[in-house]
Image (cartoon, grey):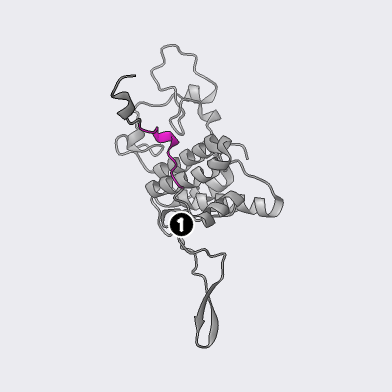
Amino acid sequence: MAPWASKLLIAEPASSVYHPSPVCPVLRQQILLGNYVDLVQLLQPSIIDTSQPREIQTNLGLVQLRNPSPTRSKNITPTEFALAFSLYRGVICSVYPTRRTELDEYLRIELDMALRFGGLGFYTYHVHFTSQAAGRIKQFNQGTYWGALDSKLYCRIFAARASLSCQLCGAPSHPALACLGGRMACNNFNDLGCSFSSCRLMHICSFCGGPHARSTCPHNPTTSAD
């Protein structure tokens, strides 16, 4: 053995270093039970355990204190949502790792709504979706698959909202970041399929811009399964 080998310090791989969860035990338990959890509480977690009574001793005896009401999020940006939901997803996947793909898809759907419509509609969808999911568990002990768009809820929230228009080409179906430079999507491709080998139009979804036909688009509420 080389003389310097005994003095060499081998750094422990980062993956094996234990990092405690930033989510407090109370919220972690609520998440794993399937209860509704306001994501803003993950951004500003409370150190108060609301499940335990709060008491104070006074000259008049023991006085029961009211637990503070949980903070309700009024405004949350897509970036804050992504951060909070990543913590939420981490709690679930620490126990149910097979759900990661499903929850990743849910996050993608949410951020797509935020990008497409702006405003807080994406978070309104999240609040309703997760509240309904929690209700199914409580009433019927039935889980909800999060990786698919709830078309009825989507239409109820966004039917009267115009999508943001592209600042480059003026089309209302996509933001400037996803603009195709003014090139049009092929209607044949989006309907029954395009048979032109030299088609000059874009063979992409005319609804979301994805590499599939509009008729099979998972984000189009008119084609998604109920």
Q: Mark 1 — residue? A: 41
Q: Residue at x 49, y 53 (%)?
A: 124
Q: Nearer the viewer, residue 25 or 91?
A: 25
Q: Residue at x 32, y 24 (%)?
A: 5
Q: Is residue 99 left or right of residue 205?
A: right
Q: Residue at x 40, y 51 (%)?
A: 119
Q: Is residue 220 visible to us here? A: no
The residue positioned farthest toward the top in the image shown: 197
Quadrant of the drawing holding the N terminus = top left
Q: Residue at x 48, y 55 (%)?
A: 24
x, y percent for residue 125: 51, 50
Name above or below for residue 204 compared with residue 195.
below
Magenta residues, as a range? 11-20
Name above or below for residue 142 compared with residue 8.
below
Categorize mark 1 by other alpha carbons within 10 Å: few (<14), some (14-19), many (20+): some
Q: Please say whether residue 17 is one of the residues in the magenta stretch.
A: yes
The residue positioned farthest toward the bottom in the image shown: 60
